[in-house]
Image (spheres, rainbow, N blue to C red):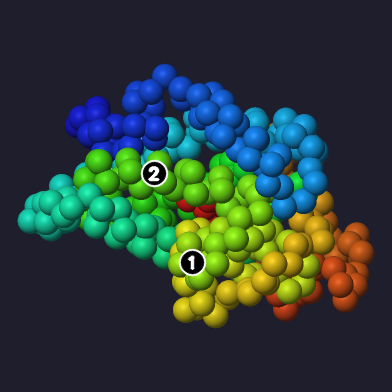
Amino acid sequence: MWFSREAQALEALPKDEAIGGRMDIFGIKTLLICALIFIPFEHLFAERPQKIFRKGLGVDLLYLMFNAFVIKVAMVIMAAGILGVVAILIPRSVTQAVSGQPIWLQVAEITLVTDIGVYWAHRAFHKIPALWKFHAVHHGIEELDWLGAFHSHPVDAIVTKAISLTPILLLGFSEGAIAVFSFIYLGHTMLVHSNLRIPFGPLKWLIAGPQFHRWHHANQREAYDKNFAGQLPFLDLVFGTYNATGDKVPDKYGVDDPIPSTYFGQVGYPFMPRKKPSDRVAPGPETRQPASTEHGPLPPVLPDIGGIA
């Protein structure tokens, strides 16, 4: 029974999510193709001066390769379990009606449903102390570019994907629609993390761009706990977390948390015990640590997800 469900899960997931779908389980092809696209454009239309071989580049490459494998394994296991639930609880008429819609309509619905999941998962990773330690790893990026899309703790990435994709698998959206959405989402996620200056004009309320998301990563008070949506900024408008910044560029990115500089240090960071209150420096008025904010590193008394980000 398990092997049967696993086979179904491989078919239900888009081919870049299925371990057996492609041999590129560590994302090498993805890396090369995306590098050929984004590196030249980031050089020609850079938002801020930044070297290609910037600080943290090697760690980001490790995230891309190792997370690609770990997340694919987790998604197959999750999909197999969900398909078992679907077979028992969801009427076949529902899944047939959903999968029978035009592809473009399915993709639009998937985008809306998943981004609502991403929004609330993302907000939870900022609000709940135990989760922030995982998500702080993503916010630890100090020089932001397209590779930042892959710089997420595996727990952050898996939880966010599970929350956002479970309704899609339960409702029975077609494999083709999920594949189209996955392709669009991957490109869009790299775009919003990129070091590109691209004016979106009036579309900025509908489609997230680099300017929208870099003001989520900014280590400045006005940016804390804002712009949680992955693709649809109007969700932040609806829920009161939109940060309108015009054309301003953040002074800096990152967090004040003591995030390790190595890949394995960052993966282990959320599991390390916090220091006692007496060992911590009292936060000043301009640090990212006020106890009243959702986003800041957590107060001493305590315990994410990148999205599908």
Taking the spot 39% from the left edge, 27% from the top edge, the residue there is: 19
To which residue does mark 2 refer?
A: 182
- Disc ID at residue 77: none
Q: Quadrant of residue 178?
A: top left
The percent position of residue 2, horizontal first and vertical second, equals: 25, 32
Neighbor class of circle 2 (other Cα within 10 Å; few <14, some 14-19, many 20+) is many
Q: Quadrant of the N terminus?
A: top left
Residue 226 placement (x, y as % from top left): 62, 70
Residue under the image location 25 percent in, 33 percent down: 11
Residue displayed at 80% across by 46% down: 49
The residue pinned by badge 1 equals: 203
Query: Does the CB distance between marks 1 and 2 fall below 8 Å?
Result: no
Height in image: 66 above or below 50?
A: above
Sequence order check, earlier mark of 1 and 2:
2
Quarter-of-image position of residue 60: top right
Q: Is residue 27 left or right of residue 247?
A: left
At x 92%, y 64%, the residue is 281
Residue 109 visible in the shown view: yes
Looking at the image, the residue that sits furthest to the left is: 93
Above or below, 241 relative to 274: below
Q: Nearer the viewer, residue 268 or 45?
A: 45
Residue 85 left/right relative to 250: left
Which quadrant would residue 225 be assigned to in this image? bottom right
Along the line of sight, the residue nearer the viewer: 295 or 212:
212
Q: Could you tell me if residue 262 is visible in this image?
A: no
In terms of secondary structure, where does tag 1 sit? helix
Residue type, label 2: Ser
Residue 213: x, y in percent? 61, 59
